[in-house]
Image (cartoon, coloured by chain):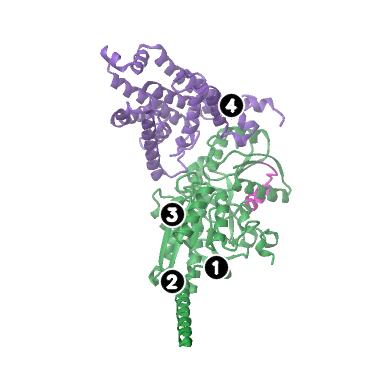
Amino acid sequence: MLKDKFSASLLVIAMTLGAGSIAVAQDKVAKIGVLNDQSGLYADVTGPGSVVAAQMAVEDSGLLAKGWKIDVLIGDHQNKPDIGSNIARQWFDVEKVDVIADVPTSSVGLVVNNIVKEKNGVYLNSGSGTSDLSNAQCSPNTIHWAYDTYQLANGTGSAMVKNGGDTWFFLTADYAFGTALERDTTNAVTAKGGKIIGSVRPPLNTADFSSFLLQAQASKAKVIGLANAGGDTINSIKQASEFGIIKGGQKLAGLLMFITDIHALGLPVANGLSFTETFYWDLNDGTRGFSKRFQARMKNKNMPTTVQAGVYSSLIHYFKTLDAMGGNPHDGLKIINAMKAAPTDDIIFGKGTIQPNGRKLHPAYLFEVKKPEESKGPWDYYKLVATIPADQAFTPLDKSACPLLKK
Amino acid sequence: MSINLQALSAQLLVGLINGSFYALLSLGLAVIFGMLNIINFAHGAVYMMGAFAAYFLLNIAGIGYWPALILAPLAVGLFGMVMERTMLKWIANLDHLYGLLLTFGLALIIQGVFQNYFGSSGLPYAIPDALKGGMNLGFMFLPIYRGWVVIFSLVICIATWFLIERTRLGAYLRAATENPTLVRAFGINVPLMITLTYGLGVGLAALAGVLSAPINQVRPLMGADLIIVVFAVVVIGGMGSIMGSIITGFALGIIEGLTKYFYPEASNTVVFVLMVLVLLVKPSGLTGRAA
């Protein structure tokens, strides 16, 4: 009698456990949270376009036809770390979100990095620049996908020094991303024998750069490095041309430029700028096909930026991994490890790999902006100058400060 | 940091340029507040509309910068008058707070609509040919366009001050604010004057928008970024004081320019620090009358 009861309860326990583990391991549900700046200065670079990219990834993954249910949530962090962390926590605790994607603005990106690790989620960051995400602040739950400050600094910085731009003055956005970019560029420039002769740090989202540009002009540096992004970059370039800085013989290095920035500046102002990107819509048939479909779905008919393309690419790899697992285990660590183990291949970045520190590798390109007469029409803006192979574009593993690598 | 006299004078001049925008915008706010008792939070939005109006005139109708200097403020001013007649008029006798909330809501709606269609990076607007290039002043390279902005805003500011403080029309206006019933008894159409005044204030903001279009991008949020600073300028100068807001506008532009030189990280906050100090010492503002 007692024995019967005992085995019966064992059976109940076994059944509950079994049922529980099936429910966790084998459901076909995924929730993606796209967290970015929906209306501020980074809204064109990330914003609604990243949401479109995420939705395209869901459709292109083919998982819906296999009975999966995938939701895309949208969050507006307004470039404020406190707002971003609130949304991230709510997504994990209340909405049971599996993946947080995009997250531009490095200060927000780093805060969310910690939350995703704490909640054992999946963090596919395409929006933030700071290379800290795969260095000192790397996390086992994070893959830093599209670009980073090391790659930008290395590509543009080295190329400019090689062409004679050996003295630099920085215009640095005063927050995590700007300072990281300045630091990485300084390393790249000094490694090639260049010299930094000064820097000035305007606050994020400054409308008038003339004071700072005058200081840069007075420094007589050959290159003015713009360690800023989005609206800040647009305004500083536009006003630099107004103050005759280019005509005076100084060169501008846009350290982080996106196609939407060039579109907003117009070729008459932007031509001749050189910078590094990992994606351009007109690279090959794959990028062209994706970009045309993307453009058709955008309200303002913009072409995709590197960040938006990165959101698509990262989610495609995530869905492939889920498909291979046959279900969603809702275990961030397990999924990230499986994603790192599999080589990546998509229409955005081609074939690539993911390093153990969470850095996604793919080639980077040095572009120059076309002259107005060279452009065949809207969005035909870039000339490819050089290709930097994937293994040289990002921080070499032996130089990465990521604690995950020390085992 | 060693003080370089050349660099310093350049910063002073740049400050003066930014000051012209502060002055034009705070002037419009002061006119509206002084005559209508409305705290017009939609001021940044109409400034942005002025810039967009110039952009549309150029890219749709092919009308250039010079006509836009007149047409854009007229069009946006008209929009302002419609706003006053259909919405603000009904809350004229209520507490300030209602006007503030209504105009703030309107600003959010207007900006939201523009952002929905034009994104956040903005659209380019070229400097008119006649004002391209610059001159070397020895201590700095002054873009001609910026010089033009300073002179033109000064003229507009003084003309507005003259109109309100020194002409018969201005006298009617000021009388109508003091005692509308009595002025009406003299046969003056007070509601019409109030509508026109609101149109004037809004038109001034739109004019500042057109002036700034070639310097900054034409962006849906260009006004939202600026309006808070401009409110600080108005508070420092004294709510409703015309001359006060003009002088404070230019002065704060210069102070901000100097901050950008000595301690750039604080350049976005220096105006507000000053505002707090002024409010602590003289709550009615530097030139304001006690409420």
Tell which tag, 2 or 3, sits nearer the viewer.
Answer: 2
Dot 2 falls on which chain?
A
Kindly indicate whether the residue at mark 4 contacts the one at mark 1 (C-beta within 8 angstroms).
Answer: no
Distance between the alpha carbons at the discs numbered 4 and 2: 62 Å
Q: Write down the region rendered in magenta.
A: A153-169
Chain of the residue under the numbered disc 4 shown in the image: B
Q: Residues within 10 Å of mark 4 (few under 14, many from 20)?
A: many
What crowding class fits label 1: few (fewer than 14 Cα within 10 Å), some (14-19), or many (20 or more)? many
Let me know if marks 4 and 3 both belong to one chain.
no
Q: Which chain is purple?
A: B
How far apart in space, not on screen, are marks 2 and 3 (Cα)? 23 Å
Per the model, the C-alpha gap separating discs 1 and 4 is 54 Å
- Kind of residue sitting beneath label 4: Ile
Q: Is residue B62 visible?
A: no
Mark 2 / mark 3, whichever is N-terminal: 2
Residue B284 lies in magenta, yes or no? no
N-term mark: 1 or 3: 3
Q: Is residue A157 magenta?
A: yes
Mark 4 — residue? B255
Question: In the picture, which chain is green?
Answer: A
Q: Nearer the viewer, residue A388 or A150?
A: A150
